[in-house]
Amino acid sequence: MTLNKSTTKSYETDASGLRGKAKEVIFPNSIPEVQKIVTITPKIVPRGGGTGLAGGAVPQNGQDTVLDLSKLTRIQSLDKERSSIEVEAGVILDDLQHHLKRYNLEFPVNPSSHTIATIGGMIATDAVGSRAIKYGRTSKWVKWVDIVDSQGNLQRKGATELSDYAGMEGTTGVIVKACLKLSPRKLRTASLVPLETVKETLALVRQLKLDSSVSMMEFMDKRISKDLGLEERYHLIVEYESDKGKIKDGAYEKLLALRDRTYPLLASEGYTRIEDPKILTDRFDKIMPWFESKNIPVFGHLGVGILHPCFNHDQEKFIPEMMKLVRKLGGQISGEHGIGLLKKSFIEPNDKKILVNIKKRTDPINKFNQGKVI
Ligand SMILES: Cc1cc2nc3c(=O)[nH]c(=O)nc-3n(C[C@H](O)[C@H](O)[C@H](O)COP(=O)(O)OP(=O)(O)OC[C@H]3O[C@@H](n4cnc5c(N)ncnc54)[C@H](O)[C@@H]3O)c2cc1C
């Protein structure tokens, strides 16, 4: 169950690129094994797919035991009448979608990391994704979670206590299983709309928000559009849950795959630091000029105001200034990736107080993800 030291290397980082050092990496095969490990281990970093972009799964100082949950992959108890399913934490989102396809059901939250991200990681970060305008965050689709607390006890937490775990980035307990709500699979089509100006883009977004069949409004700036082989204009990918879009079937799948390639492409060009501020969509025209003045490429889930500016090494010095501007515009420093290690210094004192209280109540001995978030 325990890997030797040389094989812990790949666990020194996650998709954030931050580096730390693990004491050991453990792969439990079952929930009772998780309980046993938690009982006897002093410092634990829970880990799903390692796609987190805030360093939440990065171990520190050679002291942390990484608890890799990727072997907890049981998909159980589909309740077709209630449209719900019980799954273990290590199930990868795409594997779940594949399983649900034959029942004409789906889990509707769709982060771009769907090929690797796990259900446990999605709940821990309360992941959002491209269809947030219609389906919101992961927690909205969770009926209950089973967690292992710092004493190794297995506890079931329903809707009223869910917020102690969903979005707490593994600082309060290990999520081992969840009951998820499902949605009927939809026929989806899309349109790719080129736009000349930010003003024009915003006007279209406002108009599309009135259309209940729109499930996605993904923005790409001019530079990103060009990099992806499109015209050098702003673009909106508009997804419809109807046949309104001009792009259908295979071409529709290709378009979504193109969109998923955005960050990997920017990262390969050196724009590795991806941020996720959330602003009111109406203030998009107040922040875009700032990004453009500094040549910072931007894409994002514009329908819900989550933007992904990507910074190269030289541009990272502008991040504190961006955070200030986001706050001035009444926005949030993180719309979906979480705080982890990366954004700790930007957290507001009042938000911190709330998080500290939850931590004290749920993990009084500070066993989980020490030094993260707060
Ligand atoms: C290319 C790319 C695209 C992305 N797109 C999106 C997007 O569209 N929307 C979005 O919201 N995010 C996105 N992300 C970020 C990331 O994929 C999500 O945060 C995802 O939910 C993380 O899942 P994971 O299984 O990889 O978790 P990990 O990276 O392994 O862990 C993330 C955090 O959750 C904790 N954790 C993991 N599993 C558990 C568990 N079982 N119990 C308790 N704590 C746990 C970890 O300790 C860590 O703090 C993207 C990342 C990449 C690399």
Image (cartoon, rainbow, N blue to C red):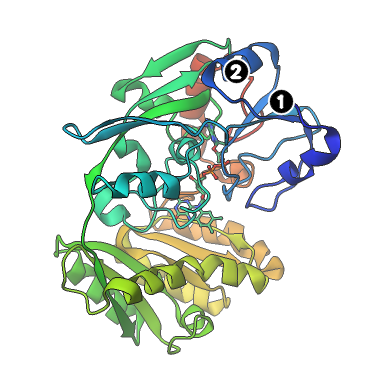
Tell me the quarter of the picture where residue 272 sits.
bottom right
Name the residue tied to disc 1: 1
Q: Residue at x 36, y 48 (%)?
A: 97
Q: Identify residue for label 2.
A: 33
Front one among 107 and 218: 107
> Closest to the observer: 166 or 241?
241
Q: Secondary structure at mark 2?
A: helix
Q: Secondary structure at mark 1?
A: loop
Contact (CB < 8 A) between labels 1 and 2? Answer: yes
In the image, taking residue 102 as reference, residue 55 lies left or right, namely right
Crowdedness of circle 1 by 10 Å Cα count: few (<14), some, many (20+)? few
- The answer to whether 342 is drawn above or below residue 320 in the figure is above
Looking at this view, name the residue that lies furthest to the right: 6
State the separation of the CA atoms marked 1 and 2. Answer: 10 Å
Asked if 8 appears above or below 357 in the picture, the reply is: below
The three-letter code of the residue at mark 2 reads Glu
Q: Earlier in the sequence, mark 1 or mark 2?
A: 1
x then y, percent, for residue 68: 63, 33
Which image quadrant is residue 312 in? bottom right
